[in-house]
Amino acid sequence: MCRKLHKRLEIDECLECHGTWLDQTELGALVGSWNDLPNTGKVVKIAGAVASCPRCKCGLEHRTYSSKCQTMVDRCPSCSGIWLDKGELDLILREIYG
């Protein structure tokens, strides 16, 4: 992981896959909200191996960002961090800001 500046906020990016790790409150700060994830998103059960949180090693929940923005995100139920695959942060920001 490397620290990367995005909209005046330091976030973690994987050097291999270019996915993004956001600690609790960081996604909310990027989208201008008090919450990282709107309550309207839904958890999706996926078969097979579940990715682990890079902070606390818990299994991540796979869910839609919101009912409007169907971009899939992975959230840690323990530390509330969020994993976004490459390009997903841009998709969420584009959906919100146009």
Image (spheres, rainbow, N blue to C red):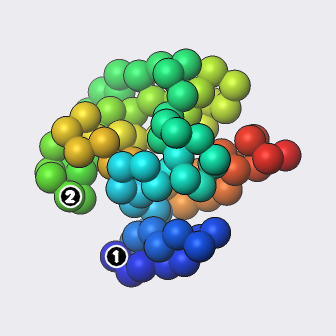
Q: Which class describes the residues within 10 Å of circle 2: few (<14), some (14-19), or many (20+)?
A: few
Which residue occupies the extreme front position in the image?
Answer: 34
Residue identifier under label 2 = 55
Which residue is located at x 25 percent, y 34 percent?
A: 77
Which residue occupies the extreme left position in the image?
Answer: 57
Q: Is residue 74 visible?
A: yes
Q: Nearer the viewer, residue 56 or 31?
A: 31
Residue 68 image offset from top left, x and y in percent: 69, 25
Say which quarter of the image contains residue 90.
Answer: bottom right
Q: Is residue 49 visible?
A: no
Q: Nearer the viewer, residue 39 or 95?
A: 39
Relative horizontal placement of residue 27, taking residue 82 as reference (left or right) = right
Relative horizontal placement of residue 2, taking residue 92 as reference (left or right) = left
Numbered badge on residue 24 = none
Judged from the image, the secondary structure of the residue bearing numbered disc 2 is loop
Residue 43 image offset from top left, x and y in percent: 41, 22
Amino acid residing under circle 1: Met
Up the image or down, 6 lies above or below 73; here it is below
Q: Earlier in the sequence, mark 2 or mark 1?
A: 1
Amino acid residing under circle 2: Arg
Quadrant in which the N terminus is drawn: bottom left
Residue 44 image offset from top left, x and y in percent: 41, 22
Up the image or down, 61 lies above or below 18; here it is above
Numbered badge on residue 1 = 1
Residue 92 image offset from top left, x and y in percent: 65, 45
Say which quarter of the image contains residue 5.
Answer: bottom right
Which residue is located at x 35 percent, y 40 percent?
A: 75
